Amino acid sequence: MSSTPSPASAPPVAQEFLGHPKGLYICFFTEMWERFSFYGMKALLLLYLVKYHLFSDDNGYNLIGAYGGLVYAMPVIGGLVADRWLGMRKAVVFGGILLVLGHLGMAFEGRQAAMVDGVIVRDEGALQVFYFSLALIIMGVGFLKPNISTIVGKLYGPNDARRDSGFSIFYAGINIGATVSALLCGWLGETWGWGWGFGAAGIGMIAGLANFLYGQKHLMGHAEPPDPARLRERLFAGLSREHCIYLAAIAGLAVVWLLIQSHSLLVAVIPGVFETSPVLLAMHLVTVCLFGGILWFMFRHCSKVERDQMFAVLAFIGFCLVFFTLYEQTYGSWVLFSDRAMNHAALGIEWSASQLTSLGAFFILVLAPFFAWLWPRLEKRGLNPGKSAKSAWGLILAGVSFLVLVWSARHPQANGLTGIWWFVLAYFVLEVGEMLLSPIGLSAVTELSVPRVVGLMMGGWFLGTSYSEVLAAKIGQLASIEISEDVALNVADALSRYSEVFLFSAKIGIGAGIVVLLMTPLVNRLMHGVR
């Protein structure tokens, strides 16, 4: 790792490429490969659980909900550690190493589960390797994800009109990785074997880490530790603070390993009064500490304008939570819906359910250049609707995407299955909504947060997403179907059940969008002129 520039030296001048700092493209390719590995694995995860390890739908949803909740809660800790001690560059490198190990560990399949005398027999040793690999990924994402996004924001000065455009470009990198990975890893996993798909995801993460290590110089010192001397300080047994952070994270893997094995998101702690689970208890604890600390900081250390802008950030985190409760169903209920009740042939190709998860990222990739071009042009003409209004329409469009699926489920084709093109349309509408909400929200977090806690606020953004994962899993369970070995799936009944869940989700998105539209004047006042 390179040394920190001397405070006495003049700050380096950022080199640019295509109108943006070169560091943006280092972050672009790092995130592209990290998302390649993340979404390549995620495209296969639920299908792997229900088809290979013979989990029930309920337990499959529970595990992806627990995994998703933890993987997006951990950035709160990763952002805090980077802000206070480690610096974003070192945090990204450490997180990348953990991710490489985790994704490669997923390639170990073990023996396929089988029904023996009415009892499902699973390879428990392989499952423990699987759970520990998920723990490595969870911890790795916690250190990498919030800090790579924060670095992008630091590459732009205050009120730089290129900021939203830069985040849209960065967002495209995420979705190049997600598009290619779902197609490649999905095909390998469902055609050649699950280990091949998961292994390909691990190779992608190696490429991402190598890219970041090679391009660190283009970050122009924006990602270094806030106090290098404090980081080098010896705490005990000759170990520096930096080494203690790494060891604490490794010890934390054991805790995450145990949490991820909880196959229920709802356990009666006090029967009839209070129900939760180890995963949710951990998330609630992180939430209370995070938002308690944020509120203390806001009222103790912020001016009136800074405090208002921080409240605006909290509002965007709330918008994010609702949107991704809908979006994350694309890796849950949408996957099983497309696998069980949809025609898969299009353009002369038979697409698998895991490959179809690439549609979301593909449409983001197509739409990102348009929105990167659009926002600066609207700003010049005074027509930019602002971040809050964009978020409102993003939520409404998310709801409309579910209405498309409701229509398709209620109007099946002659063979009783739904048409694939309705599924494609639903993804397109959803991703237009995402482009209106997610990159804009990320931009708002980096622009409106007080600089010394921006990493922590980015962790808050991902904490909102962690609850979205859990809520998406609980909504997906409303459409759980138990399939017996000797009984064929009743497609008509399945379509009816999915239709009800999709209609419920549509009401959430459209209703929340209308509420946010009504809140827009208030949020705009809290932002104090930030567009």
Image (cartoon, rainbow, N blue to C red):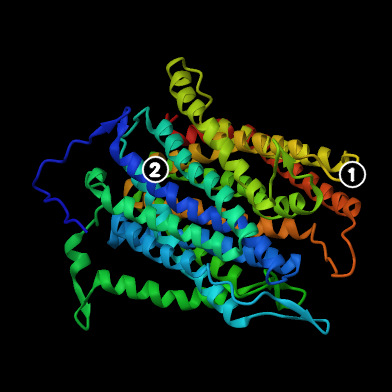
Q: Work out whether 150 lies above or below 384.
A: below
Instruction: Determine which residue is flagged by label 1.
Output: 415
Q: Which of pointers 2 and 1 indicates the residue nearer the eye?
A: 1
Q: Quadrant of residue 474?
A: bottom right
- The local secondary structure at tag 2 comes to helix
The x and y percentages for residue 483 are: 84, 66
Residue 452 in view in this figure: yes
Q: What amino acid is labelled 1 in the image? A: Asn
Per the rendering, the mark at residue 529 is none
Compare residues 226 and 69 and report the one nearer the observer.
69
The x and y percentages for residue 307 are: 42, 44
What crowding class fits label 2: few (fewer than 14 Cα within 10 Å), some (14-19), or many (20 or more)? many
Q: Residue at 32% of width from left, 32% of height from top?
A: 20
Q: Indicate left or right for 523 with 92 as reference.
A: right
Instruction: Determine which residue is flagged by label 2.
Output: 28
Q: Residue at 76% of width from left, 36% of height from top?
A: 422
Q: Indicate left or right for 417 with 471 as reference.
A: right
Q: Residue at 50% of width from left, 32% of height from top?
A: 368
Q: Measure the alpha-carbon separation of dots 2 and 1.
A: 44 Å
The x and y percentages for residue 444 are: 45, 39
Q: Residue at 70% of width from left, 34% of height from top?
A: 425
The x and y percentages for residue 437 are: 55, 38
Q: Earlier in the sequence, mark 2 or mark 1?
A: 2
Q: Quadrant of residue 76?
A: bottom left
